[in-house]
Every structure is written in structure tokens, then in C-alpha cells.
Amino acid sequence: MNGAESLVRTLVKGGVDVCFANPGTSEMHFVAALDRVPGMRCVLGLFEDVVMGAADGYFRMTGTPASTLLHLGPGLANGLANLHNAKKAHSGVVNIVGQHAGYHIGYNPPLACDIEGLARPMSSWVRTSQDARSVATDGAGAIAAAKSFPAQIATLILPADTAWNEAAGIAELEPSPQRPSHSPQAIETAARILCNDGKRTLLLMTGSALTEQGLVLAERVAGKTGCTVMGPTFRPRMARGRGRFSIERIPYVIEQALSVLQRFRHIVLVEADDPVAFFAYPNKPSLLKPAGCNVHRMTAWGENSIVALEALASMLHASAKDVNQQKLEELVKPSGPLNHTTIAQAIAYALPENAIVVDESVSTGRGFFSPTAAAAPHDWLQNMGGSIGFSTPVSIGAAIACPNRKVFCMVGDGSAMYTIQSLWTQAREGLDVVTIVFANRMYQILRGEFDGVGAGEPGQRALDMLKIDRPTLDFVGLARGMGVPGRAVRTAEEFNGALAEAKAEPGPMLIEVQM
């Protein structure tokens, strides 16, 4: 058994049985080991940022890390944008990055670089295997790091000679870690604040608290105390839809966020962080909480927020009888021109039971939350790191993690072009993903940001940096070229029809919403 095979067998033994890959010469012994080791599903991506995003989406839907396989430092560098997003989402990933054979590096070949230096900013655990006999043990360490609480990005660098030389065998795995519980004192503090000043208290939740169970408990607490429950602007995953407690998110636009938060005197954090602006703007605050507002942490990321919320509800004597019935927008099948309202209505009407929505709609989708609250029960995934090109790769990982669930990917045309190669992997794997591209022919978000930072009135050169035209992108043609059927829509009726078709047919499909 060589080092590569010992590593693959250790990964499979450790439950890391999906590998998203874009390999090169140095990784060929790992690729060969895939033929000899049963149990590892390997998915090819045509760009490393697709590979990284897919691993992020897989973890979000399973809570189990996948592995990636990348070619040397430049391959890792090509995937750092979506690895950044995965880190911000606290996703667990095991990266396997090839390296030149140890004796070859000294000759400074063209692809030689400091892979550890590239990996460290996005990885909590980094190691280079020193010899073939240590590869499996190093792999076990990477698995343990990725499965920790909170989950981590683990990057194992595999020199080519450690992959092809004789190994010691499969490594023993560390026992699965236990999720940290919570601080009883933090629960007591939160309960006291909610009892004394509930109507001026915000319960700000993310992470595991936004599962269906966490939302049930938060709804009882809100009904009992009168507090407001919200999520941050972006969340890794959230249960939504009919029968689930619908909460709003802190608005992206600073002025709107300040207005929403100004009435609170206390913020209780459940895995969330202090609300801050996404960017700095001249003469606008970075912190969004009002002056004099006290922030109290109830749980940190990785702690057991469900048990903590159960303890809080018990301390407050909050139960199902305290829940106030929510009034949600009715589902409407829209007609007429396409605009933000009719687009949201069409999506809400079309979502099937148990769908997964991956949202990178950026400017178009800011108003989608309220209209989709009454849709069929679904999960909603968002970009935590802000690096665009997130949604189409994450949709790959989500679809592979949950093959019996329909995935709806919502993406702006500018973001879609960063990782458009995702469509090829969707087609090759036959993934049940509907990609909805909002084609407004410009980086609409940047047009708003140009005004937001006070840069003045854009001239022609500035506008040329914000528009996506000359030539106009043909997303239906791009999809067809990668094996995905597509359809362009210009009215609500056409959009309804395309969504119905996509909902009825398994496999990938692209809908270009021409706005």
C-alpha cells in the first residue's frame, strides 16, 4: 500500500467519502488509489473554486466534511475565494493539496511555491506530510480537525513521493468529539433580560439555532417575552416555509439596519456576532447596534444552541401555548412584467416541499424573504463570506448531499460568470439543480455601492466597469454548451411555466430571467 492509498482508505474509514477534485500530475497516485479503494465518490470540477464551493455546500447539508483534491499551490490559490466563504460559514472541509516530491522542490520547478503560506489564512489546520508512513496519520488528524466543534478547514499537503512510496497502512481515527454544551450563567442572564425588558430585546440567532427545532423554541420565547427574533444579514442555512417560525434578517443597507435596530436596548447572541456593516462607508458607522445597547452572548459558534434554547424556554416557562399566530403573505401566481415582486412570488409559488434554495441573488433578491416565507417548507443557504461565484458550486455539494431534494440556485449574472463551469459538473453528475440567473446586464450591486461610498456620478469609464454588456451574455447558450438545457423568460407567465417545467423534470436546468 502506498501513501496515497493509505490516505484514501483512512478518509473513507473516517466518513469522508466524497471527494471534489481537480487534480494534476502530482496527484495521480491519489487518483489511481480511487480505483483500488471502494466507497469514495469522486466528483470532477473544471475549476478549483467550483471544487471548494461544492465541499462547502456538502457540509452545510450533511454536517459531515467532504475532501477536495487540488493541484499544488496555484490550484489551491484558484479555490481560495470559496474556501474563504466556507471558513466564514464554519464549514468543515478536508483539503488534499499535491506538492512536488521533496527532492524535486530544491530545483525550483515552475509550479513550486509556499503552499502552507497560501493555506494558512483560510485553514485552521495545516500540515505537510514528511514521509509516506505518516500520510495516513496526518489524514486522520485532518479529519479530526474538520469534524471539531466548531468545524474547521483542514489542509493536508501531500508531496508526490509521500504518495507513491510505501506506507504503514490505515491510521487509527480519533474519537468523534462531543459538541460543547453551553454556559448556565449565560442562560440565566438571557432569561433575566428577557423577563425584565423583553420588548426591547433582540434575540439574534444563526448557525444551529436556525434549524426547525431551534426556531420552534425561539418562537415560544418570543411569544412569552415579547422579544424580537432576527437573523444576521447572511446565514449558512436556515429552515423556512409554511409551518415554520418566520424571522426577518438585519437589512444589508446601513440606514435600514440602523432604523430596524434603534429600538433595542439588549441583543442576546445565539451563535451570532455583533451586527456590523458589510463595508465601511464615509460618515456611516461600522457597528449597527444603537448607542447604549448592551450585547450578551448566550452561545458561541459550535456550542449546543438547541439545548441552550431548551433551557432558556424552560427557565421562562415558555411553551407552545405562548406562540402567537404569524400572518404571512399569501402565495400568488403572478402575471405581467417581471420585477422584484413578481419574481419572488413566482419562486415562492413554485418551490416544492423540502427544496434547498441557494441564494446569491445579491441585489435582485433582497426583497425575497417576506414573499417566500409561506412557500412549502425548505432550507435557505446564503453566502457568508461575500466572495461571489458562491452559489452554483454550493448547489453541486447540496445536490450530492441530498439527492432526493430539488435545489434552486438563484444567482446574478455577474456572480454566475465566476464559476459558470459548475453547470458542466451538474450535467455530468445528473444533479437535480435549477439555476435561475437574474440577467440585468450589470453588476447591479456595485452600481448601488458606487453611490453608497459617495464616489459621485459615474462617468462612461466607471459605468463600463459596472455593466456586463457589449457583448450580451447568452446564459441559455452557455448552459447548452455544458450539457444543461436552458430557457430565457421575459414575463411572469413565462417564468411560471419554466419553473413548473424545471420542477417536474429531474436533472439540471437553467432559467435566464431577462430583466
Image (spheres, rainbow, N blue to C red):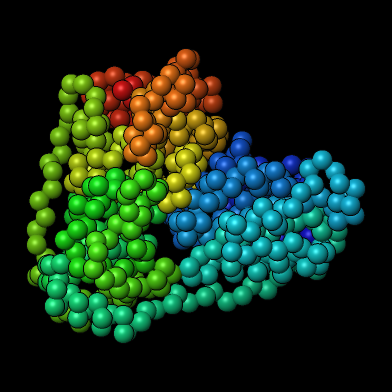
Query: Which residue does the image show at 70% across and 57% down from the upper left?
Result: 116
Q: Nearer the viewer, residue 418 or 243?
A: 418
Quadrant in which residue 504 is drawn: top left
Apparent side of residue 268 relative to residue 385 in the rendered image (left or right): left
Q: Give the residue furthest to the top.
A: 470
Q: Quadrant of residue 372?
A: top left
Residue 298 visible: yes
Quadrant of the rendering where the N terminus is positioned: bottom right
| Whole-percent x, y for residue 343 in the image | 25, 31
Height in image: 45 above or below 490? below
In depth, the one of 505 and 129 nearer the eye is 129
Residue 184 is situated, as x and y percent measured from the top left of the image, at 32, 84
Q: In this view, does 56 lie to the left or right of 376?
A: right
On the image, the x and y values in percent for residue 300 come to 39, 71
Q: In which quarter of the image is the C terminus?
A: top left
Count of marks overlaid on the render? 0
Give the quarter of the image for residue 302: bottom left
* Left or right of 219, for residue 467: right
Q: In percent of the image, x 52 and y 26: which residue is there? A: 483
Instruction: Out of 506 and 174, give the one closest to the viewer.
Output: 174
Q: In this view, does 66 lie above or below 373?
A: below
Give me the residue at 36% from left, 30% from top.
456
The picture places residue 482, in percent across and down from the top left corner, at: 54, 26
Q: Which residue is drawn at 24% across and 64% down?
A: 291
Q: Can residue 246 be seen in this view?
A: no
Position of 397 relative to 16 (above/below)? above
